[in-house]
Amino acid sequence: MMIDIETLRFDEAGLIPAIVQDADTRMVLMMGYMSRESIAETERTGRACFFSRSRRRLWTKGETSGHFLAVSGMSADCDRDCLLVKARPAGPVCHTGSDTCWGERNAPPAGGAADFLLYLQGYLRERREASPEESYTARLLARGINKVAQKVGEEAVELVIEAKDENDDLFLNEAADLMYHYLVLLIAKGHGLEEVAEVLRGRHRKA
């Protein structure tokens, strides 16, 4: 996530605009301003930190609402005078309660299956913070890595059993169950589909 601050072109006030995009859905969430100090704080904590022009101080998004932005990457545009911050929101981003500052719903992408899986992965990461009484995902993660791994094994066996029959509906539902628990296992281990894809990409180059 490190960015070369010395190459950035800050304005006269020492600020640079930062566009925040959901790392999974690709929706634009908000726009703020960053200073050298807020960029350094973002890199230190992993949470998006901005400079408030009205309050004249640093502020971490979510410091009062709890709706933090977990930053997965930052990059500068071709002129080095604007930042793109990719993050995963822990709730509505706008102070009005809207998902985005443009009043749009931060919904799953209308694209292909890969886009939806990335969205689902981000959603399940959010559910980790939910109440175990209300969320099966939170309840499963709270039981620890051994239980999550056990569930993946159970679902894999059930998928193999259904593969031997001719009921496509049951087979696809078991495949979905396995995929869900596989995603939860990746999250429990602190990894993601992107890393698995990189491994596969490396193997593909050698094939």
Image (cartoon, rainbow, N blue to C red):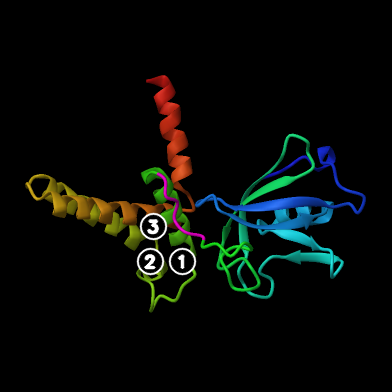
Residue 157 can be seen, yes or no: no
Answer few, some or many: residues within 10 Å of disc 2's Cα (few below 14, many 20 plus, some between 14 and 19).
Answer: many
**Would you say the residues marked 1 and 2 are in contact, meaning their CB atoms lie under 8 Å apart?**
yes
Magenta residue check for 110: yes
Q: Secondary structure at mark 3?
A: helix
- Furthest-front residue in this view: 103
Seen at 17% across and 54% down, the residue is 158
Tell me if residue 89 comes above or below residue 109 in the rendering: below
Q: Which residues are magenta?
A: 106-111
Q: Secondary structure at mark 1?
A: loop
Seen at 47% across and 42% down, the residue is 194
Q: What amino acid is at disc 3?
A: Val
Q: What amino acid is at disc 2?
A: Thr
Quadrant including the N terminus: top right
Which residue is disc 3 drawn over?
184
As measured in the structure, the alpha-carbon distance from the residue carrying label 3 to the one carrying label 2 is 7 Å
Marker disc for residue 116? none
Q: Quadrant of residue 181?
A: bottom left
Disc with the residue nearer the chain's start (1 vs 2):
1
Q: Quadrant of residue 204?
A: top left
Which residue is disc 1 drawn over?
128
Which residue is disc 2 drawn over?
137
Seen at 42% across and 52% down, the residue is 186
Q: Secondary structure at mark 2?
A: helix
Q: Quadrant of residue 63?
A: bottom right
Disc with the residue nearer the chain's start (3 vs 2):
2
Residue 131 rendering spot, x and y as whole percentages: 44, 76
Magenta residue check for 48: no
